[in-house]
Image (spheres, rainbow, N blue to C red):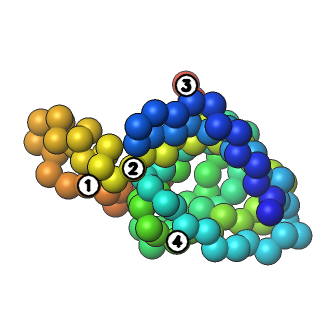
Amino acid sequence: MTTRDKEIAFGQGWQVSDVICTAGAGDSPFEEEHRGFCVAAVTEGTFRYRTREGTAMLAPGAILLGNPDTCYECGHEHGAGDRCLSFHFSPAYMERVVAGVPGARRLGFTGPRLPPLPALA
């Protein structure tokens, strides 16, 4: 396994982790699965993220988006390693969040990422 997760904080239905990946260009990508909703801020490195919602190159400042029970793959063809501050939410937790947002009618992300923001990079 090329990733190491360090739990930073958690509560009922949510968890925050510092995730470090040491994969490089010579390592084969492998399929993983999001157990819950994932919103991860890329803080170091560049990698390819592929999920059924699409494929994106992620770099510092980008936000990875993941839906529960969906498979994904990360590849490091262009560099070695990355680091993300990863927020995980249970479906029940996200249902409560969406219920509190006026006009929100849907639960789930339609794309694989949000583009990099200079303030986050």
Q: Which residue lies furthest to the left in this view?
A: 103
Residue name at image x 76 percent, y 49 percent: 4
Residue name at image x 51 percent, y 61 percent: 34
Q: Looking at the rendered structure, which numbered label has been put on residue 90?
A: 2
- Contact? badges 4 and 2 (CB < 8 Å): no
Q: What residue type is labelled 4?
A: Cys
Mark 2 neighbour density, 10 Å: few (under 14) some (14–19) many (20 or more): some
Residue at numbered disc 4: 71
Q: Looking at the rendered structure, which numbered label has been put on residue 119?
A: 3
For mark 1, give the secondary structure.
loop
Q: In which quarter of the image is residue 75?
A: bottom right
Q: What residue type is labelled 1?
A: Leu
Q: Which amino acid does label 2 sit on?
A: Ser
- Contact? badges 1 and 2 (CB < 8 Å): no
Q: Earlier in the sequence, mark 4 or mark 1?
A: 4
Residue 82: x and y in percent read: 75, 47
- Contact? badges 3 and 1 (CB < 8 Å): no
Q: Which of marks 1 and 2 is nearer the N terminus?
A: 2
Q: How many marks?
A: 4
Q: Which amino acid does label 3 sit on?
A: Ala
Q: Looking at the rendered structure, which numbered label has been put on residue 107?
A: 1
Q: Which of marks 2 and 3 is nearer the N terminus?
A: 2
Of labels 2 and 3, the one closer to you? 2
